[in-house]
Amino acid sequence: MVVVIAAYLAVVLRPESFSYNPIISPDDFVTQVNNRFFPLLPGTTFIYEGVSEDGPERNEMSVTNQTKTIMGVTCTVVWDRVWLNGSLIEETYDWYAQDKNGSVWYFGEDSREIEDGVVVSTEGSWEAGVDGAKPGIVMMGEPVVGEVYRQEYYKGEAEDMAEVIALNASISVPHGTYADCLQTKDWTPLEPGNAEYKYYASGVGLVREVVAEGGTGYMELVDIISA
């Protein structure tokens, strides 16, 4: 438990410090990701649709039965695909694990940019423990308004951060209407002037994201498919 708390403090109290160094102990992690705002039940696919500045987009996020061991921690593998104007443009395998305090950690991603069915770039890929990359928290076990935290850290490549904005937001999307949603503001120091708001419903997960600064666009939950 002491190790979990130390890791948490490293993420939350010094989110922009270059001395960021969360302590990871495999014994402090559990086998399931069941955080109420970020549940990952294998066999579940979340389908999102929206519009970016480049056109209509579709995102399918599938929780697989696969796992990957990173820094000794067993992570759940999530298969994430994005279509723009009907064409597949990105395919990513994300790795998540939950600690005993209920916080969901992000241990990296295998990301592939696609053009005309061909992988043209793997930029943005990283794995915690490799080349100085470190895991971050994608969802707190007990979010508190005002918390600022790192979601990932691979210097110069992956430095996403978030702040808890509200715990009582109400959101209507094609899949339904949700009250008491968690709202975060997400950004990265690598892209100054850009930010987005994300809304998470209890027992469901991400239901909406919308560009808040630096452009326009949104993505909304339209369906959840269970195996």
Image (spheres, rainbow, N blue to C red):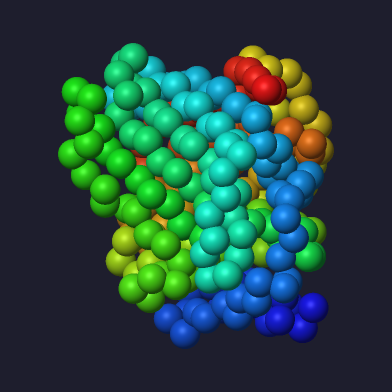
Residue at the image point whose x is 71% and y is 65% from the top: 29
- In which quadrant will I find the C terminus? top right
The answer to which of 138 and 167 lies nearer the viewer is 138
Residue 171: x and y in percent read 70, 28
Residue 157 appears anywhere in the view: yes
- Taking the image as shown, residue 214 lies to the left or right of residue 70, namely left
130 to 98, vertically: above or below: below
The answer to which of 135 and 184 lies nearer the viewer is 135
The answer to which of 205 and 107 lies nearer the viewer is 107
Residue 147: x and y in percent read 67, 64
- Taking the image as shown, residue 7 lies to the left or right of residue 202, namely left
Residue at the image point whose x is 74% and y is 60% from the top: 30
Residue at the image point whose x is 79% and y is 65% from the top: 101
224 to 186, vertically: above or below: above
Residue at the image point whose x is 38% and y is 18% from the top: 56
20 to 170, vertically: above or below: below
Residue 22: x and y in percent read 57, 77
Residue 53: x and y in percent read 32, 27
